[in-house]
Image (cartoon, rainbow, N blue to C red):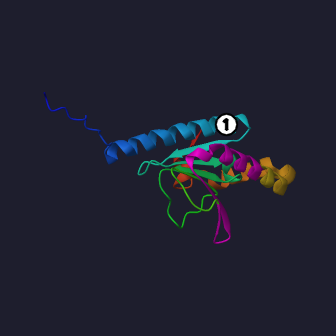
């Protein structure tokens, strides 16, 4: 009788895992953009070229920024909303006076709720001047290096 061996299970290499996470991030970003635009948000999107991260600036930055990634970001950058693949840890962290919120990919709906609640708070802060604040922030940052010069209005 022939010696039958179990088929070898292939484990994806790091390159394929990174491609899978990158595709997942792009899909999540696409879905989040659709949800937020349906709720009236103005969304600027920047897909990083050196990592698989996607950044969404909401209402020209007045309603903060979302970072969607497969890894934790640089400590000196403080995005308000962070959606990180496999994130386990505190959901709210105060860092240098800035509150940051962290979610894993399975908490997509919680992220959406937090963004909508955050926008309500910011709108109360600006009252009738919310649209003017958005426009002022857009003009102030227009053409600035980095995000503002590379992001796309979606």
| Count of labels in the image | 1
Position of residue 5 measured from the top left corner of the image (x, y, whole percent) = 20, 35
User: 94 left or right of 72?
Assistant: right
Q: Residue at x 78, y 47 (%)?
A: 131
The quadrant in which the N terminus is found is top left
Q: Quadrant of the C terminus?
A: top right
Q: Secondary structure at mark 1?
A: helix
Give the crowd class for mark 1: few <14, some 14-19, many >=20 residues within 10 Å: few
Q: Residue furthest left?
A: 1
- Residue 109 on image: x %, y %: 67, 43
Q: Residue furthest right?
A: 128
x, y percentage for residue 59? 70, 47
Q: Is residue 112 left or right of residue 88?
A: right
Q: Which residues are magenta?
A: 92-119
State the residue at coordinates (71%, 34%).
Answer: 38
Q: Nearer the viewer, residue 56 or 114?
A: 114
Q: Is residue 79 magenta?
A: no
In percent of width and height, residue 90 lies at 62, 62
> Measured along the vertical axis of the image, is residue 140 above or below residue 54?
below
Which residue is depicted at the point 31% across and 45% down? 13
Farthest residue toward the top?
1
In this figure, which residue is indicated by the disc labeled 1?
A: 35
Q: Is residue 98 magenta?
A: yes
Please tell me which residue is depicted at 39% across the width and 46% down the height of the picture. 18
């Amino acid at each position: 009788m022939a010696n039958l061996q179990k088929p070898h299970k292939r484990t994806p290499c790091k390159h394929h895992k990174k491609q899978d996470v990158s595709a997942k991030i792009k899909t999540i970003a696409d879905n989040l953009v659709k949800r937020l635009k349906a709720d009236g948000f103005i969304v600027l999107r920047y897909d990083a070229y050196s990592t698989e991260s996607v950044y969404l600036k909401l209402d020209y930055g007045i309603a903060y920024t979302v970072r969607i990634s497969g890894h934790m970001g640089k400590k000196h950058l403080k995005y308000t909303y962070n959606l990180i693949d496999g994130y386990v840890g505190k959901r709210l962290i105060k860092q240098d006076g800035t509150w940051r919120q962290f979610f894993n990919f399975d908490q997509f709906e919680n992220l959406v709720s937090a963004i909508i609640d955050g926008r309500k708070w910011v709108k109360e802060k600006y009252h009738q001047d919310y649209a003017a604040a958005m426009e002022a922030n857009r003009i102030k940052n227009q053409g600035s290096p980095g995000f503002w010069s590379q992001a796309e209005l979606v």
